[in-house]
Amino acid sequence: MATQPLHDAPPPIPAPMLLRAASLAGAGAWRCELADQRLGWTPGIYALFGLETSRRVDRRVAVSLYEPESRATMERLRAEAIETGQPFTFDAQLIRTDGSRRWMRVWGEVERHHGRSVALNGWKQDITDERLAIERLRALAENDALTGLANRAAFHARLETGDGAVVVVFDLDGFKQINDRFGHAAGDECLRVLGERLRSALPDALIAARLGGDEFAALLPAGTGRLAIARRIAAVARALAMPVPWDRQILRFGVSGGVAFAGDRTAGEPHLWLAAADAALYEAKRMGRGRVRVAPPA
């Protein structure tokens, strides 16, 4: 009598079931014939691109849905793969016909006959949720939770790039008294409102940040000269210091500022640039608060 195997081999998975599973995962297979650029897609890719499965897609239409930078990356990697026969992968952003944006990860490999590339085959998968999760984590790491502005680490990182021409720092005058008299909720409201005002008052800022406590900063591009910028920052400080209504109270405080220009810093040492702005800020507060001082040339 024949011995029965301990485990029967699993039955093959029907192709429609595989296609359905791929679609549920926001993924699908694709093929492009290089001779005439004909595309072959499984249903999951039609759904990813937001196109109907009832008609064949022209490659020019599909390519037009790539965000411009992603399109350039795709065309470059595609050309290199066709030339070298090497596989490729990249992330791309789509702008679908309804205006919505999706991120996808693309894998591709080259099919060659007699040393000549004849087709591209691959896989595409929707990774929009993954990208959004990464962006949320990045925002938590780089942004101040109370104001939504960049935090100190993000501001320092931007200074390291060498961009910008002017560093401005602001500090609230009388902030401790607000906390002591009205409580930390009132103080937090002042900080939150000041963050909104700073964004509105300096829309051209390369980055605006809360450095910690009641100290804020901004990095500005080159302007119209030292005097004009100093006058502008003085006007911004006055706007930031407008009273804040809170719980049927009016919260009043002042704002002092310090300004340092890029030419005043030691090359390659942006921390000295910020230190110069801080020194100007402390000098403004020493002179009576509610003032703006410009750091002298190094």
Image: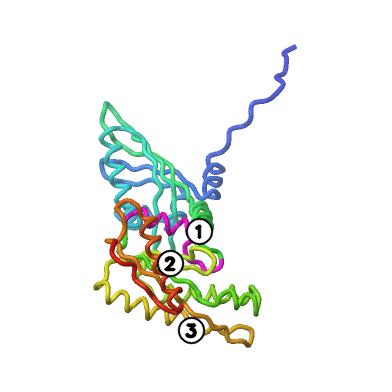
Residue at point 32%, 54% (across, down): 69
Tell me if label 2 and label 1 are in contact, CB under 8 Å.
Answer: no
Depicted 255 relative to depicted 25: above or below = below
Depth-wise, is mark 2 or mark 1 nearer the camera?
A: 2
Q: Amino acid at mark 2?
A: Ala
- Look at label 3 and name its amino acid: Met
Contact, CB < 8 Å: mark 3 with mark 2?
A: no
Judging by the rendered image, the residue that carries numbered circle 1 is 139
Name the residue carrying label 2: 217
Q: In front: 19, or 208?
A: 208
- Above or below, 173 relative to 212: below
Q: Residues within 10 Å of mark 1 (few under 14, many from 20)?
A: some
| Residue 277 counted in the magenta span | no
Q: CA distance from mark 3 to mark 2?
A: 18 Å
Compare marks 3 and 2 and give the one earlier in the sequence: 2
In this figure, what is the number of numbered marks?
3
